Image: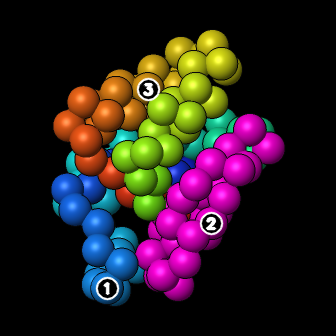
Amino acid sequence: MPCTHEFGIIEHFSSRIKKYSKYQPEKYNCISIDDDYILPLGEKLYGIKMINPCLNEKCKTLCYYGVTIIPVESLSQFRTVFIEENNHVYNQMISLIDRAIAEQKNIIHYGV
């Protein structure tokens, strides 16, 4: 089974609720991206403000094996990483980010 990362749009994020550690990609209509396309972006993603909801702490990149919340204020910078790759593989991801920006919602990420 290939390793994939799942990304979806999350309505509300509350740091007081520990519900995000439960794997629920269908709840957030997640899209899948193969790890072969996420792993090489590690350095470019580093430094973007994100949240590890399981530990209730800020982080500066995707939680590779866990859940990450990419807050609205980081989505533009997050989008730039995928745009700069200029690869059709990321088109669905870019569309997801655009929708989240337009709706002022966060993105949830489930690591491998």
Q: Which amino acid does label 3 sit on?
A: Ile
> Which one is closest to the eye, mark 3 or mark 2?
2
x, y (%) of residue 75? 45, 39
Q: In which quarter of the image is residue 64?
A: bottom right
Q: Which numbered disc, 1 or 3, marks the residue that appears first in the sequence?
A: 1
The segment highlighted magenta reads 43-68
Mark 1 = which residue?
16
On the rendered structure, is 32 left or right of 57? left
**27 lies above or below 83:** below
x, y (%) of residue 47? 71, 50
Q: In which quarter of the image is residue 89?
A: top right
User: The residue tagged with tag 3: helix, strand or loop?
Assistant: helix
**98 lies above or below 66:** above
Q: Which colour scheme is used?
A: rainbow
Mark 2 = which residue?
59
Q: Can residue 112 be seen in this view?
A: no
**How many residues crowd around disc 2 within 10 Å: few (fewer than 14), some, or many (20 or more)?**
some
Q: Which numbered disc, 3 or 2, marks the residue that appears first in the sequence?
A: 2
Q: Which amino acid does label 2 sit on?
A: Cys
User: The residue tagged with tag 1: helix, strand or loop?
Assistant: loop
User: On residue 94, which mark appears?
Assistant: 3
User: The residue tagged with tag 2: helix, strand or loop?
Assistant: strand
Q: How far apart are marks 3 and 2 (CA)?
A: 22 Å
The magenta stretch spans residue 62: yes
> Which one is closest to the eye, mark 1 or mark 3?
1
Give me the residue at 24% from left, 30% from top: 102
User: On residue 49, which mark appears?
Assistant: none
Pick the quarter of the image with the C terminus: bottom right
**100 lies above or below 88:** below
Q: Distance between the residues labelled 1 and 3?
A: 29 Å
The magenta stretch spans residue 14: no
